[in-house]
Image (spheres, helix red, strand yellow):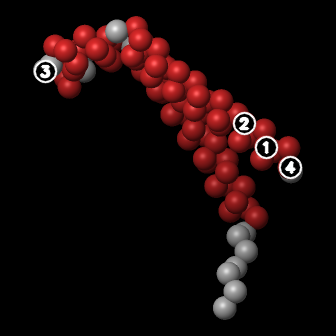
Amino acid sequence: MSPSRPVPWMTLVERVIRILVRLYLGLLVGALPWLTFWTQNNLFTYDPLLLTLAGSGFVRGAVSGLGLLNIVCAAIEAKHFFARR
């Protein structure tokens, strides 16, 4: 039995959902370190060293950079996918 070809509309839906999830996660990860929720998290309050580390500008910038990288990856994937259509 030969492998079946994917249904075209399912491929389209899967790509659009993947792009939207990457954009959403990128925005969330990019903005979350700069909100008050980031430093008032119960996980961070139990360990002063972790709270200090999470509150540093370097860690916040690195996490925001990962969010920005995720947004760029989503934009590149959207550009390549919709350019072929």
Horizontal relation, residue 33 to residue 71: left or right: left
Q: Can the viewer see residue 63?
A: yes
Residue at point 70%, 79% (across, down): 4
Compute the Cα span from label 3 to label 1. Answer: 45 Å
Callouts 3 and 2 close, C-beta under 8 Å: no
- Residue plotted at (70% across, 70% down): 6
Mark 3 vs mark 4, CA separation in Å: 51 Å
Q: Residue furthest bottom?
A: 1
Earlier residue among tags 4 and 2: 2
* Viewer-side residue, 45 vs 35: 45
Above or below, comparing residue 27 to residue 57 in the picture: below
Residue contact between numbered discs 4 and 1, judged by CB atoms under 8 Å: yes
52 and 36: which is toward the camera:
52
Where in the figure is residue 64, as x and y percent of width and height? 49, 20
Residue annotated with mark 2 = 76
Residue 74: x %, y % from top left: 65, 37
**Amino acid type at image mark 1:** His
Name the residue carrying label 1.
80
Three-letter code, disc 2: Ile
Left or right for 23, reference 62: right
Q: Residue furthest top?
A: 57
